[in-house]
Amino acid sequence: MKIGGVPLFPQQADTGAAGVDMVALVVCAICGLLALGVLVAVVYFLIRYRAGSDVNRDNPPEGHLPLELSWVGGAVVLSLVMFIFGARAYYDLRVAPTDSFEIEVVGRQWMWKIRHPSGRREINTLHVPLGTKIKLKMISRDVIHSFYLPEFRTKHDVLPGRYTDLWIEPKKLGRFTLACSEYCGTDHSRMKGEVVVVTPEEYESWQALSPLTSVQRGERLYLKMACDSCHEYQDGQVVSGAPLLDGIYGSTVGLEAGGSTKVDDDYLRRSILRPKAQVVAGFQPIMPTYEGRLSEEELLDLIAYIRSRSGSTVDDGGKK
Ligand code: HEC
Ligand SMILES: [Cu+2]
């Protein structure tokens, strides 16, 4: 948006962008009106009561109840208007629709690594199909970063050790800005790239140029790390007293220490990195720790593979 040829807002490349801009405008308008009222009163009193002006200065009023009530009431209403607009836009911004298409993002000092479901990977560039709801599942390898897409009016922190997400729905073809908006070290300012919005057909053929899907990579790794030496049946029996991983995603498991927990991506990640932190009820803590032995990318592959064994292709927290 431009006012008098000056670009005030970046273009709106996301279906939700207009809503976010609306909040900014409503809040600015309300604050602007208030500031204007104060300014007018200041100027009026300045002139009326300037030194030497001939006005009655006796008996200044002590208070004025109706005036005070309407001021307090008005302020409450105005702040509620800002709150309602803001809360609705924030909800739309934060809660990804359950049918979103999932792309993974791994942040590190100082680059963005992007992984598509087909297995295609890229660095500092994010190809997305037009008109599709896309959920970005994000994690950092080192410090806190923040995935910032100004034209999509959204950003979210990318944390080490925990998955966070963000969703977009591109409504414009073209190239847009991708940046890190959390100071993350010397080259923070260079941790940026591009979002390339293409048509769904172009995206399909672009994705197809990929050697292995993340599920396939995960399966390979699963065999390579010999996870199956414990987590599989042999001759109809669980060999080393380890739980089967089929169908666990989205379910609730009991814990040896008491209580239970939902099996989501964070739980799987913890179970692989620090199995002893949450031992499954009825099992011995014999699983070795994989802390330091798997990269974030490898973990995402393993999780995608375990998820696929529950028939789940997206990180929907098992909501299906
Ligand atoms: C030495 C045997 C052994 C190996 C090897 C092993 N695990 Fe485990 N795993 C276990 C046992 C026993 C449990 C249950 C106790 C616990 O939670 O620590 C478990 C629990 C889990 C859980 C939680 C399961 C649930 O039902 O909540 C996951 C996920 C998991 N392992 C994944 C893996 C992956 C991935 C690998 C390979 C990188 C692997 N495991 C290698 C023995 C093993
Ligand atoms: Cu950063």
Image (spheres, rainbow, N blue to C red):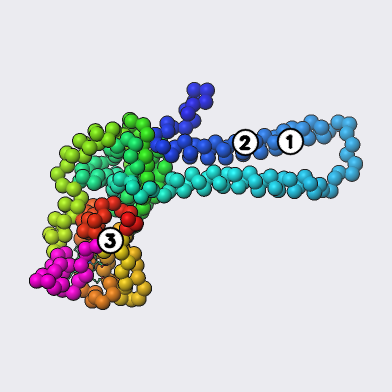
Front-lying residue, 307 or 148? 307
Q: Earlier in the sequence, mark 2 or mark 1?
A: 2
The residues colored magenta run: 227-247
Where does residue 74 sit, x and y in percent of width and height?
69, 45
Name the residue located 13 percent from the left edge and 60 percent from the top edge.
Answer: 223
Mark-to-mark CA distance, 2 and 1:
15 Å
Q: Is residue 227 left or right of residue 197?
A: left
Q: Which residue is mark 2?
A: 32
Residue 42, which numbered label?
1
Q: Residue furthest left?
A: 235
Query: What is the quadrant of residue 39 in the picture?
Result: top right
Q: Which residue is mark 3?
A: 249
Q: Is residue 49 left or right of residue 113?
A: right
Name the residue located 32 percent from the left edge and 72 percent from the top edge.
Answer: 254
Q: Earlier in the sequence, mark 3 or mark 2?
A: 2
Mark-to-mark CA distance, 1 and 3:
64 Å
Where does residue 77 sit, x and y in percent of width and height?
65, 46
* Kind of element beneath mark 2: helix
In the rendered structure, which amino acid carries the disc numbered 1? Val
In the rendered structure, which amino acid carries the disc numbered 3? Tyr
Where does residue 174 sit, x and y in percent of width and height?
33, 30
Magenta run includes residue 230: yes
Instruction: Name the mark nearer the viewer: 1 or 3.
Output: 3
